[in-house]
Image (cartoon, rainbow, N blue to C red):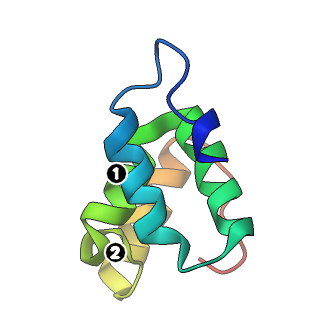
Amino acid sequence: MLDSSGVKSYERERERIRLDILKLNVGSEKKVREYVAVAKRDYRDVLFWAEYPEESRFDTPEKKERVRKTFEKFGIKLPDDL
């Protein structure tokens, strides 16, 4: 699965992404697949989640509100759990 990550010219930082996917997957093959798919869309998401775990969590009301405002600003439907 990891071999399919970083093969296109626009898929940057191949080794870094692969290591970060392994950091994030917690031993789940399903999660590896999901993170590879995310990396193919925008590899920066995987980098952010793996390398800045504290910042990437929605663990405070302030962070949730900031995300809500951003979604609303761009007209994106809010997820039910936000």
Location of residue 54 (image quadrant): bottom left
Q: Residues within 10 Å of mark 2 (few under 14, many from 20)?
A: few
Indicate the secondary structure of the residue bearing disc 1: helix
Location of residue 8 (image quadrant): top right
Q: Residue at x 34, y 75 (%)?
A: 63
Residue tagged by mark 1? 47
Disc with the residue nearer the chain's start (2 vs 1)? 1
Q: Residue at x 59, y 34 (%)?
A: 41
Q: CA distance from mark 2 to mark 1?
A: 19 Å
Kind of residue sitting beneath label 2? Lys
- Please tell me whether residue 60 is drawn above or below residue 49 in the rendered image: below
Please state which of residues 17 and 66 is positioned toward the viewer in this rendering: 17
Q: Residue at x 65, y 63 (%)?
A: 78
Kind of residue sitting beneath label 1? Leu
Relative to 6, is 66 on the left or the right? left
Residue farthest toward the bottom in the current orientation of the protein: 60
Residue tagged by mark 2? 63
Q: Residues within 10 Å of mark 1 (few under 14, many from 20)?
A: many
Across and down, in percent, residue 81 comes to 66, 81
Across and down, in percent, residue 26 comes to 53, 80
Q: How many marks?
A: 2
Quadrant of the image for the C terminus? Answer: bottom right
Q: Residue at x 48, y 45 (%)?
A: 73
Q: Which mark is residue 19?
A: none
Please state which of residues 71 and 20 is positioned toward the viewer in this rendering: 20
Relative to 20, is 10 on the left or the right? right
Indicate the secondary structure of the residue bearing disc 2: helix
